[in-house]
Image (cartoon, rainbow, N blue to C red):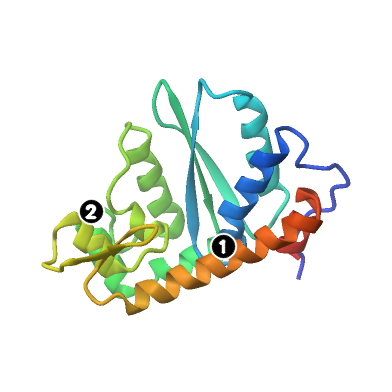
Amino acid sequence: MRTCKNNKECILNHVSNDYEKRLLKTISPVIKGIKPAEIISLPKSEENVRGKLKLLTTMYNNCSKIKGEIINYSSKSIKIFIYNEYALQKILHKMNIRNFLATCGYSPSYSLEDCLEKLFSKISMGKIPDEIGIFLGYPLKDVMGFMGVVNLPLTKVNYWRIYGDANISDRLYDNIQKVKHHTEKLLVHKTPQQVFESLIS
């Protein structure tokens, strides 16, 4: 199966090496399908914002495993939504997820594209909707607990707020961290470009 376009150009040459490494570590679980999506905030006042935006867009344009959407969040910030289409589709096909999203204004008949269009429209209005946790792969109970629509105690904060029984949330967190740690180890001895190519292979 083809995983990446045939592009000889080094795609990670637009910004600092440290930023490249942080970005690869952040999106590696999405590339691997452990996490369906990630949202990245890019302040418009940030140093070399054009280079960082170019880096992000070039990455998802050169890898068939991920896609991306640039959202003009506010006059001060850009949001870049990076997603693994296959992983996100699996989540949004679940009936309990579709029923929950229906309470947030997403029709049960919506396709993946329709759901994303609705989500992006909400974000472009300058507010991150609470249901984005579903798109980011967080367990439904944690999203509903955060929104206060179920009576579950806050158990811990471990990258996101975890409510009720932590087992399923802990397993997801551990899997995300394993991919990030693996990526971090690769970056010790390899260039960001080499690690990127390793992740998408």
* Label 2: element kind: loop
**How many residues crowd around disc 1 within 10 Å: few (fewer than 14), some, or many (20 or more)?**
many
* Identity of the residue furthest to the right in this view: 8
Q: In the image, is residue 170 above or below residue 199?
A: below
Q: Say what amino acid the circle numbered 2 marks.
A: Cys
* Label 1: element kind: helix
Q: Are marks 1 and 2 in contact (CB under 8 Å)?
A: no
In percent of the image, x 41 and y 63: which residue is there? 137
Q: In the image, is residue 76 above or below residue 191?
A: above
Q: Position of residue 54 (x, y in %)?
A: 67, 33
Q: In the image, is residue 168 above or below residue 85?
A: below
Residue 98 visible in this rendered orientation of the protein: yes
Residue 34 visible in this rendered orientation of the protein: no
Q: Position of residue 31 (x, y in %)?
A: 62, 60
In-front residue for pair 107/157: 157
Q: How many numbered dots are placed on residues in this image?
A: 2
Q: Is residue 193 left or right of residue 96?
A: right
Q: Is residue 132 left or right of residue 200?
A: left
**How many residues crowd around disc 2 within 10 Å: few (fewer than 14), some, or many (20 or more)?**
few
Mark 1 vs mark 2, foreground winner is: 1
Quarter of the picture holding the C terminus: bottom right
In percent of the image, x 51 and y 66: which residue is there? 176
Task: Report the residue marked by disc 1.
Answer: 29
In percent of the image, x 16 and y 67: which residue is there? 153
Q: Position of residue 50 (x, y in %)?
A: 63, 25
Q: Say what amino acid the circle numbered 1 marks.
A: Pro
Mark seen at residue 87: none
Quarter of the picture holding the N terminus: bottom right
Task: Report the residue marked by disc 2.
Answer: 104
